[in-house]
């Protein structure tokens, strides 16, 4: 239980910079428990974690990734935690897990954060709204062995349907997706600091920096290791 709590703790809040790797690791660990045990662990985590602890807000993203989208209504219950930046689509079925979008088993977060006015929804209430009748995802997340090809498809150039639907069709939005994709590589990344991380969000030369990062990351062959839920060198 303590190990599971540590994995949940590591998932960034919906207000913090997004990082898909700890989200994948927490979701996969819970998925392997089965539905009832996974919900029990999440309830116990929220019951024993102080309400001032930011990591509690990571559970919003965990349950939106861990459970399948019900049909009907074709989307998960919305997070009632404030005004997202960028805004949610008018039709929630367009991005049914908003602010999470899963592409090739990579859970991207498409919002930078929320402007909170009033009292946000409690993490416990959000868990119950999804888990009460929810269906656990059938398989653990298994990102592809070439995650950078996914990033290239989504954010390698402006104007893709994905970027437009998510409200990310500008350099800042593209940088958000690229940063999350590169973050998946973890410690095996050989990307120069000057082109990675928060620096992606500044300057008009995002395409040039992305190509530098992509070439550096592809210097060695990698594979997703399902036993450790992370990439390793082949």
Image (cartoon, rainbow, N blue to C red):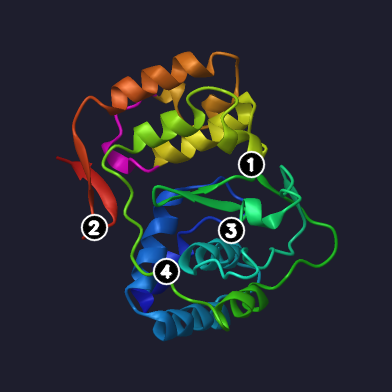
Find the distance from the CA under tag 2 to the CA under tag 3.
24 Å
Q: Provide the major secondary structure of the magenta segment.
A: loop
Please give left or right for residue 179 compared with residue 167 in the image.
left
Badge number at residue 166: 1
Q: Which residue is mark 2?
A: 226
Callout 2: few (<14), some (14-19), or many (20+) C-alpha neighbours within 10 Å? some
Q: Secondary structure at mark 3?
A: loop
2 vs 1, front mark? 1
Quadrant of residue 215 within the rendered picture: top left
In this rendering, position of residue 48 left or right of residue 41 = right
Q: Are marks 2 and 3 in contact (CB under 8 Å)?
A: no
- Expressed as whole percent of the image width and height from the top left, the position of residue 122 reads 69, 73
Disc 2, SS: loop
Q: Which residue range is magenta in the image?
A: 184-192
Please give the residue where the numbered disc 3 appears in the rendered image: 97
Between 68 and 63, the residue placed more toward the observer is: 68
Residue 151 in sight from this viewpoint: yes
In the displayed structure, would residue 41 be above or below residue 158?
A: below
Categorize mark 4 by other alpha carbons within 10 Å: few (<14), some (14-19), many (20+): some
Q: Are marks 1 and 4 in contact (CB under 8 Å)?
A: no
Magenta span includes 185: yes
Query: Most extreme residue toward the right, as rendered?
Result: 118
The residue at 23%/57% (across/down) is 226
| Distance between mark 1 and mark 4 Cα atoms | 23 Å
Within 10 Å of the Cα at label 3, are there few (<14), some (14-19), or many (20+) other Cα atoms? many
Which label's residue is closer to the chain start, 1 or 4?
A: 4
User: Mark 1, residues whose alpha carbon is within 10 Å: few (<14), some, or many (≥20)?
Assistant: many
- In primary-sequence order, the first of circles 2 and 4 is 4
Q: Earlier in the sequence, mark 2 or mark 3?
A: 3
Foreground disc of the pair 2, 4? 4
Q: Mark 2 or mark 1, which has the lower sequence index?
A: 1
Whole-angstrom CA distance, mark 2 to mark 4, is 16 Å
């Amino acid at each position: 239980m303590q190990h599971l709590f540590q994995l949940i703790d590591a998932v960034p809040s919906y207000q913090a910079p997004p990082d898909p790797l700890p989200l994948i690791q927490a979701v996969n660990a819970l998925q392997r428990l089965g539905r009832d045990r996974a919900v029990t662990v999440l309830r116990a985590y929220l019951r024993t974690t102080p309400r001032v602890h930011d990591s509690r807000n990571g559970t919003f993203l965990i349950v939106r990734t861990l459970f399948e989208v019900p049909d009907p209504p074709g989307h998960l219950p919305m997070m009632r935690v404030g005004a997202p930046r960028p805004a949610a689509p008018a039709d929630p079925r367009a991005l049914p897990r908003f602010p999470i979008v899963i592409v090739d088993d990579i859970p991207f977060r498409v919002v930078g954060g929320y402007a909170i006015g009033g009292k946000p929804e409690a993490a416990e209430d959000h868990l119950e709204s999804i888990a009460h009748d929810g269906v656990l995802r059938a398989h653990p997340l298994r990102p592809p062995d070439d995650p950078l090809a996914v990033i290239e498809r989504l954010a390698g150039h402006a104007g893709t349907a994905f970027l437009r639907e998510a409200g990310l069709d500008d350099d800042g939005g593209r940088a958000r997706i690229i940063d999350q994709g590169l973050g998946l590589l973890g410690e095996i990344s050989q990307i120069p600091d000057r082109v990675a991380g928060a620096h992606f969000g500044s300057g008009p030369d995002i395409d040039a920096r992305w190509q530098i990062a992509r070439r550096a990351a592809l210097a060695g062959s990698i594979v997703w290791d399902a036993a450790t839920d992370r990439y390793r060198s082949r």
